[in-house]
Amino acid sequence: MTDNRLTLSGTVCKTPLRKVSPSGIPHCQLVLEHRSQQVEAGFTRQAWCRMPVVISGKAHLAITHSITVGTHLTVSGFISTHQGRNGLNKMVLHAEQIELIDSGD
C-alpha cells in the first residue's frame, strides 16, 4: 500500500458546515488556513494554503461541535480528490486525528 498521510496546522477560516449522511454518519466540512515559514534550498520562504477538511464519524462528534471560525487545529489524515458541482476537482484532507490548539489568549 502507498503512503497517504498529511498533518496540517492552521486556523479555521470559514464557518464549518455540519451534515448527516442518509446512512446517519455525521460530517463536518471546514477550511483550514495554514501560514508558516519554511526553509527550502537553504532559504526561508513563506508558506500559505487553504485546505478543505472533512471530519466524519460519531467518534469526532464532540470535538466538531467546539470548532468555529478562528479555532486553531492540527489535523492528520489522508488526502483525496472531490469533484465539486462545477465539475472542478479539489484536494480534500479527510481527518482521522484532530487536536485543538490553545491560542494562548
Image: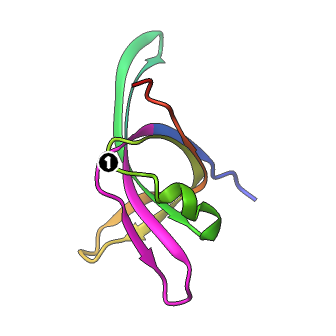
Where does the image place residue 90, in percent across and percent down from the top left? 37, 61
Relative to 22, is 40 above or below?
above
Q: Nearer the viewer, residue 81 or 13?
A: 13
Q: Nearer the viewer, residue 22 or 62?
A: 62
Relative to 62, is 11 above or below?
above
Q: Residue at x 51, y 35 (%)?
A: 101
For label 1, count other residues whose C-alpha is less than 10 Å away and answer few (under 14), some (14-19) or many (20+). Answer: some
Q: Which residues are magenta?
A: 10-32
Q: Amino acid at mark 1?
A: Val
Residue 16 in magenta stretch: yes
Residue carrying label 1: 69
Relative to 34, is 104 above or below?
above
Main SS, magenta residues: strand
Left or right of 47 on screen, residue 73 = right
Left or right of 13 on screen, residue 22 = right
Q: Residue at x 65, y 64 (%)?
A: 59
Left or right of 21 on screen, residue 4 = right
